Amino acid sequence: AQKVTQAQTEISVVEKEDVTLDCVYETRDTTYYLFWYKQPPSGELVFLIRRNSFDEQNEISGRYSWNFQKSTSSFNFTITASQVVDSAVYFCALSEATDSGGYQKVTFGIGTKLQVIP
Amino acid sequence: EAQVTQNPRYLITVTGKKLTVTCSQNMNHEYMSWYRQDPGLGLRQIYYSMNVEVTDKGDVPEGYKVSRKEKRNFPLILESPSPNQTSLYFCASSPRAAIGGTIYFGEGSWLTVV
């Protein structure tokens, strides 16, 4: 089973529509972190947010918001009033401790490609 | 400027010809890692390093070697590249080796093995 599942491989929306990118994770740890990264067409990976497992408060940053629900093991990402510049691949990632030594192991989902059509 | 720098950015090479992709970070980060990105598979970890002289395998280490002789550098070595190693490679670093450290990525290296 995948540790991080992004079931939507590609999404297309018309500009100004809201869009939610789903992320479901799997872990046996009680302490873990979740991330979202953006990969625009230029290819670099841009950090968007980090959330630890003890903080279920939703977060909003401008047009971006994140909904973390431990009960469903989900960390979904919503873009409000989407813009063409939001077109990118978005990755969700899970940081857990390794079995040996407690160092961090980060597992990424396969990504969701978002296309915002003008 | 805080950054992770990897070179070369683009490379076409032939099967079996040893190559090294360098990675350097100027943030004094403990943790460094290499990922490869392939269509439909997302980012998969190749190797990671918790500190100088401490490295461990990620999910897809076969065909790769790494070393961490200095804190800032973490080169990825392909001793005998094969076409299935054609991919986009990312070096990354994080302030701490413990969980939760934000991962900062280099700009990526496009590698083609023919």
Image (spheres, coloured by chain):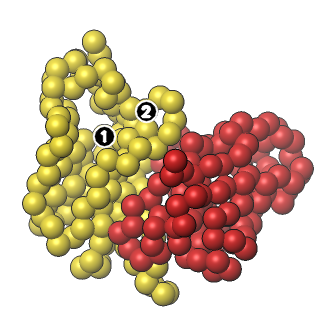
Chain colours: A yellow, B red
Q: Residue furthest right?
A: B17
Q: Is residue A5 above or below residue A1?
A: above
Q: Which residue is painted at 16% across and 58% down in the image?
A: A68
Amino acid type, residue under disc 1 in the picture: Gln
Left or right of residue A113: residue B71? right
Q: Is residue B35 above or below residue A117?
A: below
Q: Is residue B37 above or below residue B30?
A: above
Find residue A40 and name its label.
2
Left or right of residue B85: residue B32? left
Q: CA distance from mark 1 to mark 2?
A: 17 Å
Where is residue A49? Give x, y as percent: 28, 52
Where is residue B41? Give x, y as percent: 50, 48
Q: Which residue is painted at 86% across and 46% down in the image?
A: B15
Give B37 or B100, whichever is nearer the viewer: B100
Q: Which corner quadrant holds the N terminus of chain A? A: bottom left
Amino acid type, residue under disc 2 in the picture: Pro
Q: Which residue is painted at 57% across and 42% down in the image?
A: B107
Give B34 or A25, whichever is nearer the viewer: B34
What is the crowding at mark 1: few (fewer than 14 residues within 10 Å), some, or many (at least 20)? Answer: some
Give B68 or B40, whichever is nearer the viewer: B68
Q: Secondary structure at mark 1?
A: loop
Find residue A103 and name its label.
none
Q: Note whether residue B36 is visible.
A: no
Q: Note whether residue B34 is visible.
A: yes
Q: Which residue is mark 1?
A: A8
Where is residue A109? Give x, y as percent: 39, 52
